[in-house]
Image: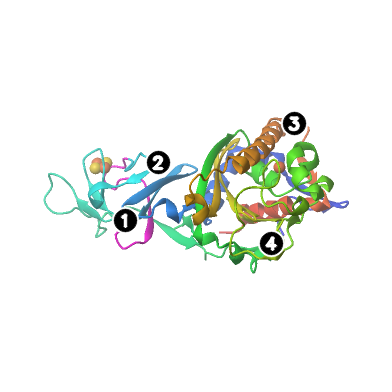
Amino acid sequence: MVAEPGAASGVNRTLPSRYYYDSHIFEQEKERIFYDAWICAARSEEIPRAGDYLLREIVDESILVVRTGGGEVKAFYNVCRHRGNRLCSAESGRVSGRAFTCLYHGWSYNLDGELVATPNNKGRPSLDGDPLSLYPVAVRLWEGFIFLNLSRDPEPFEPDLGALGDTLPKYNLANLRIGHRKVYDVKANWKLVLENNVECYHCPRVHPELCAIHPTFRSGVIGQETHDGAPLVDGATTYSDTGFGARPMISTLSEEDVAKFRSLTIYPNLFLGLLPDQVFVFYKWPVSPATSRLTVDWLFEESVVEAPGFDPRDTVGFLDRVLKQDYAICEEVQKAIRSRAHRQGVYLEHEHLPYKFNQWVLERLHADG
Ligand code: FES
Ligand SMILES: [Fe+2]
């Protein structure tokens, strides 16, 4: 175990406060976490046809994710091999002529990233035998999600499903579809947001509406990252003001999944909220030491999203309120945590999930090599 935080008198220490604002730590996190670990970037359904593409910003790097002519998903750094211009600027789109063309001098690359044209030049240039293809980024598809890894030698892709390994397949994630998306800019370090996300000690004070749906949350202790999950009130089926929605349960779930909320965090940036009628997804994107961006997707079965009159406002509005409560408190913590008096905080026993996450961060930052 790494040295800095350790157990002391029945409590565990949080990360040192400077980990939440220090630009040197943030640089280390870029290299050791966001440019080295598998990052969940998007849903595969966002680029269904050959030539469809999207951009993702992984901290300072812009990554181009594309559906090739062969139906594969490939990813490249969004930078031209000629003199380094950005190749694409639109957040998403469909490339015409099955080639990306740089706006500067017109070099073109096909959907597999190969250089295919250099205007007003005979033949195709290369450098020491390098054909000047786009710089590749490793891709893995998992349950309908696209994961990227910026390392030249990516670690094995092994998402840790914890206690939910046998349960997750019941949610049929690969076949769910995006019914709604929202983006939140939060003035708080990405780790503060994640830590808030995985503990419910704050729920009784911060989330009165959520506690009405989850009476057990009033005790501040939840078992959401377990097979048993956290019960919803009186057989409720969704997150909404009433706890009931017009949508059917996900058809692959069974009776034992009624009125249950489960969740799963896959470090560093993916969170899944598993409800009977939907799965909501948080992608966390660090922007600077003290700011983050959150993309939230609400996933439903395809038949639900495509049904005439599909309207998720009841559940989107409810979660939106909960998230704004969370982000307001995270922004307050971000301001206060810089106090010269507060070098480090503590976690109680039932805050074991943020503590576990902190250990993971420390292992990555301080591992050899
Ligand atoms: S920088 Fe792209 S063609 Fe010159
Ligand atoms: Fe919360």
Magenta residues (range): 68-85
* Circle nearer the N terminus (4, 1): 1
The answer to whether the residue bearing label 2 lies less than 8 angstroms from the nearest atom of ligand 1 is: no
Q: Amino acid at mark 3?
A: Arg
Residue with the mark numbered 4: 257
* Circle nearer the N terminus (3, 2): 2
Q: Residue at x 13, y 47 (%)?
A: 121
Q: Secondary structure at mark 4?
A: helix
Crowd tier of the residue under label 1, counting other residues whose Cα lies within 10 Å: few below 14, some 14–19, many 20 or above: some
Residue with the mark numbered 3: 340
Instruction: Please provide percent x and percent y for residue 298.
Output: 56, 48
Q: Marks 1 and 2, Cα distance to the nearest angstrom?
A: 17 Å
Residue 129 falls inside the magenta stretch: no
Task: Indicate which label's residue lies in the foreground, 1 or 3.
Answer: 1
Residue with the mark numbered 1: 50
Please identify the dominant SS of the magenta region.
Answer: loop
Task: Indicate which label's residue lies in the foreground, 1 or 2.
Answer: 1
